Image (spheres, rainbow, N blue to C red):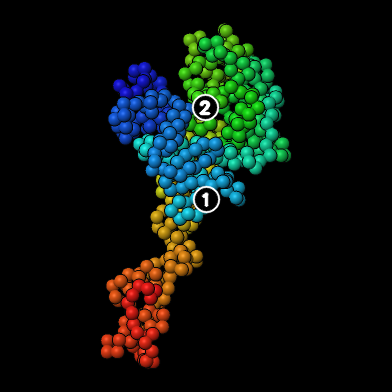
Amino acid sequence: MLYYQFNGYEGFKLCFGLEQRNNGTMVRKNKILLDHLKHRPLLKYCRENNDYTLLNIHNMADLQEKIQGAVKASGKEDESLPYKIELIGETYWSAKYRTDEHKGLCGDMDKASIWYVNIKRNRPFKMKSGKFMRSVMAETKIGQIISPVVLNWLSGDVFTQKWHTYMYGQTSDVTLHVDSNFKKIYTRDKCKGNFNSCMADMNRDDFYKYSVKAQAAYITDAEGSILARAILFTDVSDSDGGKWRLLERQYSSDDNAIFKHLLIEKLIHGKHIDGYKIVGASCNDASAFVKIDGTSLHDKKFEIECDLEEDGPLSYQDSFKWYDYTNRKAYNYPHANWSHELDTTDETLSYEEECNEEWDEYHQYYCEETRTCYRNGREISVDVNNLDDFEWICSRNEYHHYSDITVCEECEEAMLIEDTKHSDLTGGQYCCQTCREEAEKRFKSKNWHYSEYDDEWFENEYDITNINIYNDQTLLYEKKTISISTLQDLIMDEKIWFFDDEAFNAVNPATRFPYNYKHQNNPSHEYTTSEASV
């Protein structure tokens, strides 16, 4: 504990303690952050440099901000990483890759990939955004000491979503709305796809009209369908007397994180908010708010005016869930005077419902039985009879959400995106080394040039020539391909003879000419072993 700024064991439990979910499952809070703090190479680095900045982190927002900043600074200071990578206004450094004038944008507008130049091959390729960023971060000294779990989260979750949002903004026709039409955002027919909201079509929207000061914030596509929505609390106070406009947890079409980020970006650009609930890790944490610049507000204590009667309509609350009925205020922390919890699907404060069923966290409803699945690397409970959005991954023996899955381009087996093996040669993603090697072998057979003598493929045609190999069985020469480099080695070892600009590996020792060669008494046919003959 000496290296970490926790308020004793109670402070540690508050941040990383076990909590019980609706289905009775006990899970540990902030598992990614805990894995970061327990990583031995990071602790060793901090002790050797007497700098504990990367250990003094208590929430996911700070983890993201500090690690990304340290990675970029580490790359810039490292002379062994001379090549610049520019992505979404940020600069990274690498020894293997660089970006060109397109700054990562693919010509075919592939939203999932980054266009880059491979330094060794001096050719452009494209790679999945998360895979590319992980490789770039892992080149830096900081990237080599942080936990692989954190590295996967920052590259495969945080950056991937940010890149998708950026790419979507380059091509999409999306409109932002900020109004009081709460009925619209809670009507399923107005939304595109499944928003997985337990309050949809429940007629609870009057809560936001009459009980709190709020607005409906949402984005629509060209057809007017809602892609993402959230409640914007317009009059939030902190314990220091400050005033805030805070965006609550976002919901989107099929839980698409890109749409959530796009909603936030448009609200920031339109100067509608001062902070927002973070997307992704710890999104159910009542304190997981950040400023619009990404600075954590985790330590802030917020409250809102809330005039809710015992029989008034209640809508499920993610953040301001501790209600003080006497003083008519709701808090994002367990205030000393709180009387009711608002994170409930009950219709009113006085409504009680007995339910012995299990809660489906993904679809947001009760069911007879749930099982553990994974989404964005986190455990969630899902109805065993409604697993359409999840697929069984044999290599993990687990169910994972389709957004975290891709297909091996060789064997077509489902695999996690974070487990893929990228090929710089084909540009494809594969589930294992064997599949990658098979795909590269087939690619070479179609596009490269084969040396029969070396039993090897060469990219350029000018790297290959011919040689006459004597067959002791047929007593004839067979013409085969050979690489220039191998031929030069044979010349240096004086194992090759040249006649009429053709190479032979064997000659008749009696005549010093190729077997069956008819001497024409021409001095220009004299054999040679000089490298100049090539």
Give the residue furthest to the top.
326
Measured from the top left, where is residue 338 in percent x and y? 51, 12
Q: Earlier in the sequence, mark 2 or mark 1?
A: 1
Tell me which residue sits at (60%, 13%) in the image: 305
Work out whether 113 lies above or below 526. above
Q: Nearer the viewer, residue 438 or 27?
A: 438
Give the residue furthest to the right.
223
Q: Quadrant of residue 56?
A: top left
Q: Which residue is mark 1?
A: 126
Q: Nearer the viewer, residue 367 or 392?
A: 392
Q: Look at the image and tell me whether residue 379 can be seen.
A: no
Tell me which residue sits at (48%, 15%) in the image: 334
Q: Nearer the viewer, residue 95 or 455?
A: 95
Instruction: Report the quarter where the N terminus lies.
Output: top left
Is 245 displayed left or right of 50 in the figure? Answer: right
- Crowd rating for badge 2 (residues with CA inside 10 Å; few <14, some 14–19, many 20+): some
Measured from the top left, where is residue 215 in percent x and y? 66, 22
Under mark 2, the amino acid is Gly
Instruction: Report the quarter where the C terminus lies.
Output: bottom left
Q: Which residue is mark 2?
A: 294
Measured from the top left, where is residue 87 in percent x and y? 53, 40
- SS label for mark 1: strand
Is 195 displayed left or right of 380 in the figure? Answer: right
Under mark 1, the amino acid is Lys
Q: How much space separates mark 2 and mark 1, taking CA atoms?
A: 29 Å
- SS label for mark 2: loop
Tell me which residue sits at (40%, 55%) in the image: 433
Work out whether 479 lies above or below 455. below
Q: Nearer the viewer, residue 22 or 11?
A: 11
